[in-house]
Image (cartoon, grey):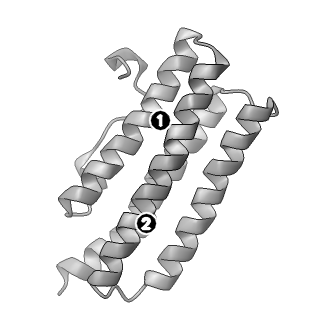
């Protein structure tokens, strides 16, 4: 796990969607991004960074599948749009992983900022919509 000094970003209560399992998965995604950031700051090799990106892709796919299943069970009105957004985001993170593997993309602070914005933006802009709908029921 990244040291406190190497954290790119930390969990905030404002990220909570009020569903413990989803919040825990979001925390894990934050942890993976921070782990990638830490390897960058420590100058660890590209192999370590590529492995973390692989793990992030796998975890993202798993998280999105779980979240969509839960939203389906709870009859979320915006499921189709949310699922489409997941496909777009998963493709972005896969493209970054593939570019990192091929050497077209370096693990950089710009990549780290993109990943932070990618995750935080999705949680705060998209996931909070279903959180509000569920709270309103």
Residue 5 in the image: state x and y as whole percent: 37, 16
Quadrant into which the C terminus falls: bottom left
Residue 90 falls left or right of residue 14: right
Residue 2 visible in the snapshot: yes
Name the element at disc 1.
Answer: helix
Q: Is residue 106 above or below residue 130?
A: above
Name the element at disc 2.
Answer: helix
Disc 2 vs disc 1: which is toward the camera? 2
Please name whichever residue, 14 or 48, is drawn nearer the observer in this view of the structure: 48
To which quarter of the image does residue 88 belong? bottom right
Residue 124 in the image: state x and y as whole percent: 40, 60
Residue count near mark 1 (Cα–Cα under 10 Å), binned few <14, some 14–19, many ≥20:
many
Residue 113 in the image: state x and y as whole percent: 57, 37
Q: Which residue is mark 1?
A: 33
Please name whichever residue, 64 or 3, is drawn nearer the observer in this view of the structure: 64
To which quarter of the image does residue 100 belong? top right
Residue count near mark 2 (Cα–Cα under 10 Å), binned few <14, some 14–19, many ≥20:
some
Residue 16 visible in the snapshot: no
Q: Which residue is mark 2?
A: 65
Please name whichever residue, 77 or 63, is drawn nearer the observer in this view of the structure: 63
Residue at the spot 27% in from the left edge and 44% down from the top edge: 12
Residue at the spot 59% in from the left edge and 67% down from the top edge: 87
Q: Is residue 84 above or below residue 47?
A: below
3D distance between C-alphas at marks 2 and 1: 19 Å
Residue at the spot 19% in from the left edge and 84% down from the top edge: 136
Quadrant into which the N terminus falls: top left
Q: Is residue 113 above or below residue 6?
A: below
Please name whichever residue, 7 or 68, is drawn nearer the observer in this view of the structure: 68
Q: How many marks?
A: 2
Residue at the spot 66% in from the left edge and 20% down from the top edge: 46
Residue 121 falls left or right of residue 16: right
């Amino acid at each position: 796990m990244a040291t406190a000094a190497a954290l790119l970003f930390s969990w905030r209560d404002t990220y909570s969607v009020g569903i413990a399992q989803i919040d825990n998965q979001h925390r894990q995604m934050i942890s993976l991004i921070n782990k990638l950031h830490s390897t960058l700051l420590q100058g660890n090799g590209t192999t370590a960074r590529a492995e973390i990106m692989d793990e992030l892709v796998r975890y993202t796919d798993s998280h999105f599948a779980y979240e969509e299943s839960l939203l389906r069970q709870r009859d979320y009105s915006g499921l189709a749009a949310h699922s489409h957004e997941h496909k777009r985001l998963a493709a972005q993170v896969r493209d970054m992983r593939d570019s990192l593997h091929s050497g077209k993309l370096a693990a950089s602070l710009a990549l780290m900022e993109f990943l932070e914005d990618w995750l935080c933006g999705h949680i705060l802009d998209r996931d909070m919509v279903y959180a509000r709908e569920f709270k309103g029921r």
